[in-house]
Image (cartoon, rainbow, N blue to C red):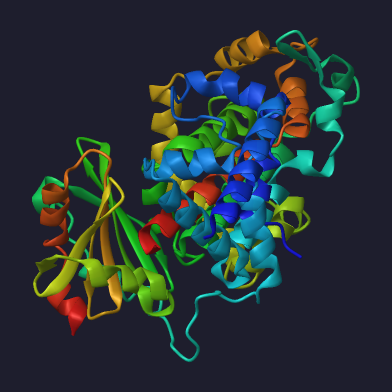
Amino acid sequence: MTESLHAVLEALPQSSLTTHVLGALDYIVPGEWRNITVFEELVKDVTGETDDALIQQVGERAMQLYADESNGYQRAVSVYRGIDSASTVAGAAAMANLAGQRFELLSFLTDVTPKPDTTQAIDAGLKLAGELVAFALTNGIPGDSVGDFVSALANYGKEEKMRLAAWLAIDCVLPLGPDFLQKILEALDGPLEDIENNRVFKLVSEHLPGGLGEQRDTIKRNVEESRGHLESMVADHGITQEGVMEKVKEYVAIADDKLDVVAAALDLGTNTFEHTGIQTVARRVVQRAYGEI
Amino acid sequence: MSPRRILVTAFLLCAALASGCKKEEPKSTRWEDAAAALASAPAVDADAAPGVALSPAGTLNKFFPKDGEGGYKRVFTADKEGYAEAKLQKDGKEVAVVSISDAERLAYAKAKFEGATEKLDGSPLMTVGKNQSTVLVKNRFQVKVSSPTLEHEARKAILSTFDLKGLGT
């Protein structure tokens, strides 16, 4: 039996290493993200309605839409779940002990080896492809329609915007530096096997049209066409290696100052795509239910 | 109801209230109940009328207001089988969500229009909750404007910028 929409949302933690890191990165997209993990609160937030019977009707319709597999929402959630490395390290959250209001990344860091730049860059590019695929599954835009995705990206709000900011900070700027886009594009031009053997590629490739070569082109085009928007987001919100590090340290106790080690630890210890991705899918389904009832 | 029955009912009610006071207010289980009801129902849409194909993706968005109409920037946000949605923005801020849904398989969505007192281009028009105005075209397509900031008249004005005629033919 598949999980119901309300159960999927309500299984998200109210406080975890992930929520602390997202809180730390809130300065990039101030006020966009609220950690809504209660289904009823989400229905009220989306609709702005107060009538209890109406809220019930919207919630039930949303659950019904989610339960029907052919609508694609469940697949979008599994893509978001698969993007994060953390979902494969389920114990990561347990490793991070709550010390006062800050999370301890200490013990965790001793085991972390940073990824080589090329691997990190390919990972980052594929995570953006994962976002494209999950977006397409949720909203019904064809999977090869990069143009539609890129224009939607520029209009991202709330959880979507938070997720994009976290990706830029943790997966791009922190480990790769200011010229991260160049590094991603170069890495994607490397040997096809490097892409083919990547964990995230295995997850998204079934949703991308064509053979391996064509899929690589779509993944690259996705980065190239998003480039303008991503660069202005980095510039407008002043996302720098030092800035990200400083903010994260306010919320998470980190014993190491090496940027790539911290980035690798955050990558392993958090599941920002899964957490905010589930919130996005739930919000989109509730919005549709509100339109349909 | 006999007087004795009323007494018994009243007694039970008091007892329930009294015991309710001692304990914590129980958490609502309405979503758990809804999930359980769904799980025991077939996987397909519970309200589906068999044999009717929904409008394919890509067929509804052409009836939306044009980009720039009424001073609103239009951004399409969903285009799925039986449902298309866009947001309308002014000065970069979201003002309304507009949608067309194929209500062919959702009997209650259509039935509510039986109580509609207004009309737009000959189709029944009504409000839903505080924030929605909606019109049912061809007894099938529900066109909706949802906005927490606009009043019914303003939402109605947006509804009239849809190609309702095109949708109805």
Q: Quadrant of residue A208?
A: bottom right
- Corner quadrant of residue A49: top left
Which residue is at the front of the view, A238 or B87? B87
**Picture residue at 53% right of the left edge, 18% below the top:** A240
A148 above or below A87? Answer: below
Q: Give A103 or A198, whichever is nearer the viewer.
A: A103
A207 or B120: nearer the eye?
Answer: B120
Side of B123 relative to A285 (left or right): left
Question: Which quadrant, please, contains the C terminus of chain B?
Answer: bottom left
Residue A147 in the image: state x and y as whole percent: 39, 57
Q: Is residue A111 left or right of residue A77?
A: right
Residue A293: which quarter of the image?
bottom left
**Farthest residue toward the bottom?**
B51
Residue A269 pos. (x, y %): 77, 30
Which residue is situated farthest in the front direction here?
A: B3
Residue A187 shows up from this direction = no
Residue A82 screen position, x and y as percent: 72, 50
Is A94 placed above or below A56 here? Answer: above
Q: Is residue B137 visible?
A: yes
